[in-house]
Amino acid sequence: MQKLVVIGAGMASGRVLEHLRETAPDAYEITLFNAEPRGNYNRIMLSPVLSGEKSYPEIVTHDDDWYAANKVTCRFGEHVVRIDREAKQVHGQKGAVPYDKLLIATGSAPFIIPVPGKDLPGVVAYRDLDDTNAMIAATGKSGARAVVIGGGLLGLEAAAGLRLRGMEVTVLHLMGHLMERQLDEAAGYLLKKDLERRGITVLTNASTKAILGEDRAEAVLLEDGTVLDADLVVMAVGIRPETRLAVDAHLEVGRGIEVNPQMLTSDPDILAVGECVELNGQLFGLVAPLYDQAKVAAATLTAQAAEFVPRELSTKLKVTGCDLFSAGDFAEGEGREDIVFRDPARGVYRRLVIEGNRLIGAVMYGDTADSNWFFGLIKDGADIEEMRETLIFGPACQGGGQADPLSAVAALPPEAEICGCNGVCKGTIVKAIEGGAGDLGALRAITKASGSCGTCTGLVEQVLQVTLGDDFQRPAAQPMCGCTELTHEDVRLLIKTKELKSQEAVWQELGWKTVNGCHACRPAVNYYLLADWPLEYKDDPQSRFVNERNHANIQKDGTYSVMPRMWGGMTTPQELIAIAQAAEKYGATVKVTGGQRIDLLGVRKEDLPGIWYDLNQAGMVSGHAYTKGLRTVKTCVGSDWCRFGTQDSTGLGIKLEKKLWGSWTPHKVKLAVSGCPRNCAEATCKDVGIICVDSGYQVGVAGAAGMDVKETERLVDVRTEEEAIEWTTAFIQLYRENAKYLDRPYKWVAKVGLDWVKEVLGNDAERTALVERFDVSQSVYQKDPWAERASPEAARRFQPLADFTKEAAE
Amino acid sequence: MNWIDIGAVEDVPLRGARLVKTHEGCVAVFRTAETEVFAASDTCPHKAGPLSEGIVHGQKVTCPLHNWVFDLNTGLAQGADDGRIEVYPVQIVEGRILLDVSFLAKRSAA
Ligand code: SRM
Ligand SMILES: Cc1cc2nc3c(=O)[nH]c(=O)nc-3n(C[C@H](O)[C@H](O)[C@H](O)COP(=O)(O)OP(=O)(O)OC[C@H]3O[C@@H](n4cnc5c(N)ncnc54)[C@H](O)[C@@H]3O)c2cc1C
Ligand code: SF4
Ligand code: FES
């Protein structure tokens, strides 16, 4: 009888042995080595063992009786240390065995990130039963904390299992969302939300710097300085094919042991299967393809013709209650089309990727009942042309079904506040409707909802529609863009009431129809989030128009203009010299603007960090001449010089500019302060314009002098400079919190009414609170963006990624 | 195919782009998702706007100058606009971005 030696008793080799027993029980005398002190078991069921839902004996696939019955000589707990191809012998720790055929099935080794402290006791990987038992042991101590490094399949199953056993668990993930290889952002968001609901803390964009501890792991240190206490650290960042034996034996090895479609390595007497192999550059990390490989390997061993063909894979997470599914490939291919369906009320997300007439990828969260049907379509390459329109609704809805644009409103709980001005919540409105209020007018009369500033009108109407059904015909409001049925005002209010603090949350909870918005809604949503949650939300430069991302104004030829701030229009000889030098050095054209400052035009993108650095050195900061934010505060010379000046208009202008610069607003904001009613600073056509008079300051708002021309309206007359600054700041914060993106103040005031603005700002407590909220926002956003980007590290981003023109010239 | 390593995936901001300069003009490398990249000509067929500075959404980019939208799979302008940008094969291998630069050889060969 021929001798077969198998290295590794894992999922793949177990299947090979079964096929051999079925097709050719007497072909080989088999010796099975395994480094683990046990035989084959179902490795993927370690997660239920960890969580306590199963026990080890339940997941054993081959027991002693099986090996005995099938005459397999077991050498468990014994590492193979060397393969001698000349002598055709395998060397185990306890001695050599000759072979006619050899099967390598050594699987993978967990990848351990090379940080200080990685070898401390208390740091474990997640690969085998011993790791699982080590984790279970750590849960014994009450109040014990675990940090799981890696938010992929393994890491999350580990986290969920440890949490079920009562540990405090934090997951660290390097990327922006969980399981980024299988899920897109929306599904990643829902998964994170589900895990957080179970009490697991999830930190994304978290990079581990070191594991701290004297004799054992005690804490994890992150790059950003955060320290997380940990009794147990689980590393689940990835795997590497276990190829050491093959490398030493001089078999051909790439990332894995190279095999042909018959599972033969570069030595015709040696086969390999499982995670340790590589076929045409591809590695395999899920059991489905390994089972196919096992079948082929068994056939090859018995001289049958067979060929391994990699097929489509799908992923599910084995965490009870987290229903997710992902299949196919999102990353490559031509001519694709996305179809997205979201049901915020049920926490459902579905995305299909179609290429030509075929479905090539699917991500689902929340409701995966139809996943097999979709996976079938992907695997078979079925023609879906006929059902394209309704495909996303699954097999049951072929021919019907529509996404409900009102589901976001329907999903709001009764206590969700709809009208902020009058503190009216959804429940009150619904009660009034049920009590007979059948239209907006009646609702306003009874509940006061939408009776003040009116920005919630759209939402109140939606509540009417949801409650009354077809009895109510809502006037068609202009939706924000093609990605949603909601208006800007609706979105702003829902971000506040539902406490949505990330873009993913907005897309999912408000039922966006696209994967991640478009060029119209993204900048608006980004603004709303940062204005409402300045401390929690982090500004996303990629959701900004180029000017705001690059902090310079793009020109028609792709160059940029650079405009330093000139506080209140004042400058100094030193500043002018520095501006002149910078202009010369970077070849810029110099122009005096209509806003009392100097513009340097025609600067190349690569030179931006350089010119910013030079201007910074002379004490100048960005003039934000590119932002939806504070632009200029124009002033006149005022009482310092002018024979008619009543107050220090220049000084007040500078104070205002120093207070307000750097804040983001729905549209640009321009101010002016004139020293007397002759109004040389043109204050009467600004967003906020102040006219100084003998008795104090006249604060006007909502002027315009661009596409429309409109005189300011008087907001208030105050006696002191401090009051003028306070009212101005409060007005701007009210505008920041309520206006629709891209409405200048005059447009917004026209919608809500100056009376309402006066009423809010006239309330002392309200006014003070607005100023306080403005200050909180400024603590984050009043930073010179030029200085931040002139550092060598940040400046790199302004250079090309690669430059082949230089290489070729050499 | 002639794959050349042009940088790490993280060098391109998520939903952003970076430039690769070549003798055939600038190529923009877009990162549409954590592990998804596309490469296309940087130059808008409308009035030569730099597409690498546009807003990236789904597998599309919007030109920063006048809002034409291009599908990065096909290079075709969307909606009413009529135009197309060249798209190039690109792939991610172990966290590195590989660009197929065969299109550069065409000219030198001629
Ligand atoms: C540089 C400057 C013209 C100049 O050379 O003087 C200028 C230049 C631009 N203005 Fe202006 N505006 C300039 C003062 C004005 C003024 C006068 C003022 O500020 O006193 C107005 C009228 C007041 C107002 O703000 O409405 C003005 C009303 C506009 C508008 C119309 C806004 C509106 O709501 O009606 C736009 C378009 C927009 O913002 O959507 C605009 C847009 C632009 C843009 C940014 C167009 C663009 O998106 O590329 C121009 C950039 C030119 C370039 O290639 O860099 N610019 N622009 C002025 C810069 C002032 C500064 O120091 O910051
Ligand atoms: C916790 C967990 C959950 C998983 N969940 C899923 C899932 O839901 N779905 C899915 O498809 N996949 C899942 N996987 C992946 C799946 O388990 C692997 O793809 C599969 O086990 C690989 O099979 P293999 O035979 O190649 O290697 P393994 O099953 O790892 O077997 C290799 C064996 O070789 C032994 N060995 C290595 N070197 C030597 C040597 N020199 N001498 C002797 N013996 C050696 C090892 O000790 C090991 O027992 C999961 C994995 C883990 C760890
Ligand atoms: S008026 Fe303003 S936007 Fe128009 S061309 Fe002049 S600078 Fe440009
Ligand atoms: S240059 Fe691109 S849209 Fe005009």
Image (cartoon, coloured by chain):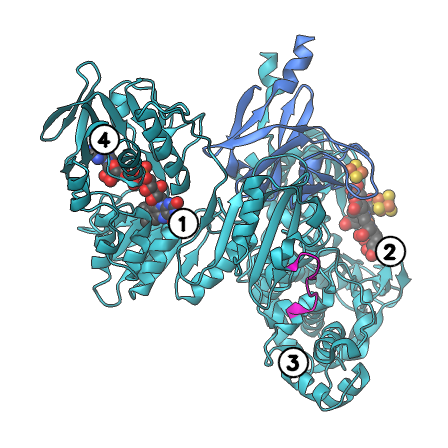
Q: Earlier in the sequence, mark 1 or mark 2?
A: 1
The residue closer to the viewer here, A700 or A724, is: A700
Of badges 4 and 1, the one in the foreground is: 4
Residue A45, x across and y down, in percent:
32, 52
Q: Secondary structure at mark 4?
A: strand
User: Which shade of the palette goes to chain B?
Assistant: blue
Q: Earlier in the sequence, mark 4 or mark 1?
A: 4
Where residue A656 is drawn, which disc sits there? none
Q: Earlier in the sequence, mark 3 or mark 1?
A: 1
The amino acid marked with disc number 4 is Val
Q: Secondary structure at mark 2?
A: loop
Disc 3 and disc 4 in contact, CB within 8 angstroms = no
Q: Which residue is mark 1?
A: A153
Q: Secondary structure at mark 3?
A: helix
Q: Secondary structure at mark 1?
A: helix
Give the Cα distance between marks 2 and 4: 80 Å
Tag 2, which chain?
A
Tag 1, which chain?
A
Q: Dot 4, how many residues are within 10 Å of its Cα: few (below 14), some (14-19), or many (20+)?
A: many
The amino acid marked with disc number 1 is Leu
Looking at the image, how many numbered discs can be counted on the residues? 4
Tag 3, which chain?
A
Where residue A6 is drawn, which disc sits there? 4
Give the Cα distance between marks 3 and 4: 67 Å
The quadrant in which residue A722 appears is bottom right
What range of the chain is rendered magenta? A397-408
Q: Which residue is mark 2?
A: A706
Is ligand 2 less than 8 Å from the beta carbon at label 1?
A: yes
